[in-house]
Amino acid sequence: MVKGVIEMYLGRRQPDDKDHIGNKRVRLVGDLMTQLFRAVFKQVLQDIRQQLERHYSRG
């Protein structure tokens, strides 16, 4: 990234348009599955925690 800024300052490179479709990052299946797994796993942990708290509060 720093190299790109220096090259742009020296005139060797043109500024990038971050909204251009060619500069968009493709989100692959593995990335999406990881994100989904984390969200669901977090929910499962929260549910287990709540059930344990209920169980211990009842005695």
Image (cartoon, helix red, strand yellow):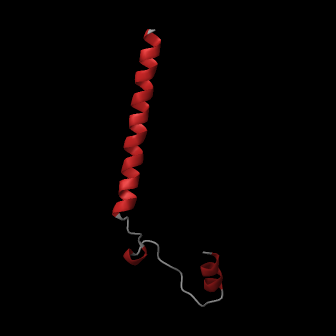
Side (left or right) of 2 relative to 18: right
Report the front residue among 58 and 10.
58
Who's the residue at 53% across and 81% down the image? 15
Who's the residue at 44% across and 22% down the image? 52
Who's the residue at 36% across and 57% down the image? 32
Number of marks in the rendered image: 0
Outermost residue toward the bottom? 12
Q: Residue 28's image quarter?
A: bottom left
Across and down, in percent, residue 30 comes to: 37, 61
Across and down, in percent, residue 50 comes to: 42, 24
Residue 24 to residue 53: above or below:
below
Report the front residue among 38 and 25.
38
Across and down, in percent, residue 11 comes to: 61, 90
Who's the residue at 41% across and 29% down the image? 48
Across and down, in percent, residue 24 comes to: 41, 71
Residue 40 to residue 5: above or below:
above
Residue 52 to residue 59: above or below:
below
Outermost residue toward the top? 59
Which quarter of the rendering shows the N terminus?
Answer: bottom right
Q: Residue 34's image quarter?
A: bottom left
Residue 32 to residue 17: above or below:
above
